[in-house]
Image (cartoon, grey):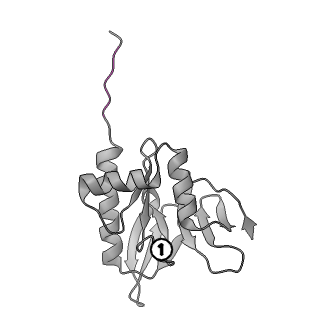
Amino acid sequence: MNIINDYMISLSTIAIVPYRHPQYQTMIIDEEGIFYTSERPEQIISRSCITYGASYNGRRDAAIYLLNYIQKTPILISEADGMIAIPTHSPDREECAWIFYHHIKKIKTNEKNGCILKFHNYTHLELKISSQTMKQQIHKAAVIYSIFCIKNIHFSFD
């Protein structure tokens, strides 16, 4: 079991998933492997937002103000890197996992009325939400990406 403290979200972060264990609260799926931490998912998300330049509440408020995404609002972690965390449930709920938009390759429906997310690195994650709900969440993240991350900056010293 790989244990990590003060995990910082990066481009290699695939998912942050609640984990039921007496000591460890979160399982982190990363391109470098699977890690466990005593921090709750929302602590990791919040600290990472601040590190990349804005508070969790500021990121959420901006998305709500511009897009009216009040429920299960995807959170822009870093606009420079295009990192967006997609919640599977309300962040207030214990079972809320956070999936990173740029790693999602495909969604498949499973027979348990949930979905399986396939990622670009050929790993997968089974979730207890419908594929339709996950598609809606991905659509929200795509809109956030198009508004905050795609910039055509033209500057010249001439």
Q: Is residue 116 left or right of residue 26?
A: left
Residue drawn 52% across the image and 56% down it: 46
Left or right: residue 3 versus residue 93 is right
Estimate the x, y position of residue 7 in percent, counting from the top left: 64, 56
Any magenta on residue 97?
A: no
Q: Which of these two is toward me, 69 or 144?
A: 69
Q: Position of residue 102 (x, y in %)?
A: 44, 56
Q: Which is nearer the eye, 121 or 149?
A: 149
Reply above or below: 68 against 135.
Answer: above
Q: Amino acid at mark 1?
A: Cys
x 42%, y 72%: residue: 88
Q: Secondary structure at mark 1?
A: loop
| The N terminus lies in quadrant | bottom right
Secondary structure mostly taken by the magenta-highlighted segment of the chain:
loop
- Say which residue appears at 71% left-offset and 61% top-offset: 4
Q: Which residue is mark 1?
A: 96
Q: Specify the farthest residue to the top.
A: 158
User: Image check: 40 left or right of 58?
Assistant: right
Task: Point out residue 12 in the picture as x, y percentages from the top left corner.
Answer: 56, 54
- Relative depth, front residue between 100 and 90: 90
- Magenta range: 152-156
Q: Quadrant of the C terminus?
A: top left
- Work out whether residue 86 can be spotted: yes
Q: Is residue 139 above or below residue 55?
A: below
